[in-house]
Amino acid sequence: MILFYVQHLLGIGHLRRTLAIADACDQNGLEVCVISGGPAFDLGPFSHLPIHQLPPIQSADLRFSSLVDEHGQPVNVALESERADQLLRIFHRVSPRIVVTELFPFGRRRFRFEIEPLLNQAQKQGAKIICSVRDCVQHRSEEREAETLSFLQRYYDGVFVHGEKDFLPFDASFRRAIEVDDLSYTGFVDTAMATVPGGSSSNPEVLIAAGGGAAGEVLYEAVANARRLTRHHEVRWRMLVGVNPSESLMQALRATGGDGLVVEPNRNDYRGLMTTCRLSVSQAGYNSTVDILSSGAPAILVPFTGEGGETEQPVRASRLAESGRVSLINESDLGAQHLAETIDRLLDVGPPRFDPVCCDGATRSAEMLKNLIH
């Protein structure tokens, strides 16, 4: 049995990546159990997996300044205790041979109240402990990096970095990566179960998406205003605005963008849309990057920095731009006119599609976990 712990705070990228790895383990004949601590979402093709939902906690704002419960109230000691108790009860019930914590200890330090007891019990019972982390992390102080190393040395048997060293080495975001024992690159984890037909190559669209959280609304508004400024009125723009968008948000964006802008919730055929779109516009989250690489779609990236100076997406987007793979617009420069001009410039010349990249990190992660058991 492999126990996965994942906590998402804004979007659902962390959860989707964990579910994709758990699904690959399940297909490889391994028993899995996923514990999710963020808001519940429709899990779609991953709904067959055994998933335990803790009382949800999420970020109160884009600065990650505080945590709130599902009712928007500040997290209190009672909720922390309830979650920690549930987590340990699940651990003892399933008795895993491997415990995988997503991101921690490179992030989610605020959740030590439940993660440390889990790690202590796992270590006490002889379970292997693995950190599952995306290709880059938020830049931290030297003191925080030292604390992270201390956690790794005390508890962990390995770190799985879900990226490619040649593309973006982990030390580009975690400076002391060379000091991490048993750090392995798995390749990118593709969270799309399959490529579902979702568009027509005879009428390719500009496809806009910003994941499944609230952090993309600045991009949505800029796109809606940019639609009225484009010279290429013949090209339809399709905007996907999250998993559970409000009807009022969608109506407001439609009214701003006009007839040439389709606004709708996220779709399960998104990868199909990516494989036929004329141009993709998105933020530079992990899953958005994998969608671009796997589909070969030409793209504009607007990396999310939030209100607190997030560094993860700018690092990834800059690497893609340096390779000539995408066009880059900084969030601070995002405006309707600039966005419309950038889209028009790319539509004027094509733009060409790229050769898709195989992102089989979920399968490789499952094989690595299986080797730890046998």
Image (tube, rainbow, N blue to C red):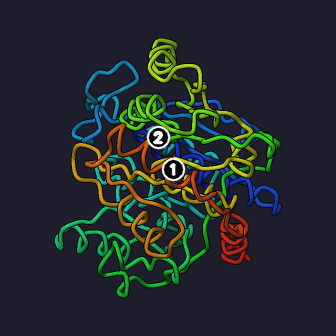
Which one is in front, 286 or 294?
A: 294
Q: Who's the residue at 24% across and 41% down the image?
A: 63
Res. 233 mark: none
Res. 11 mark: 2
Q: Is residue 80 above or below residue 182?
A: above
Residue type highlighted by circle 2: Gly
- Mark 1 lies on a secondary structure that is helix
Splitting the image into 4 quarters, where does residue 30 fall?
bottom right
In x, y percent, where is residue 292? 61, 58
Which one is in front, 166 or 23?
A: 166
Res. 14 mark: 1
Side (left or right) of 272 relative to 64: right
Residue type highlighted by circle 1: His
Q: Who's the residue at 49% across and 58% down the image?
A: 101
How many other residues sit within 10 Å of disc 1, few (<14), some (14-19) or many (≥20)? Answer: many
How many other residues sit within 10 Å of disc 2, few (<14), some (14-19) or many (≥20)? Answer: many
Please count the marks in the image: 2
Side (left or right) of 38 relative to 333: right
Side (left or right) of 92 relative to 145: right
Which one is in front, 73 or 43?
A: 43
Q: Residue furthest bottom?
A: 178
Q: Are marks 2 and 1 in contact (CB under 8 Å)?
A: yes
Q: CA distance from mark 2 to mark 1?
A: 8 Å
Q: Who's the residue at 38% across and 34% down the image?
A: 222
Q: Is residue 284 above or below residue 174?
A: above
In x, y percent, where is residue 207? 60, 41
- Mark 2 lies on a secondary structure that is loop
Q: Is residue 166 above or below residue 260?
A: below
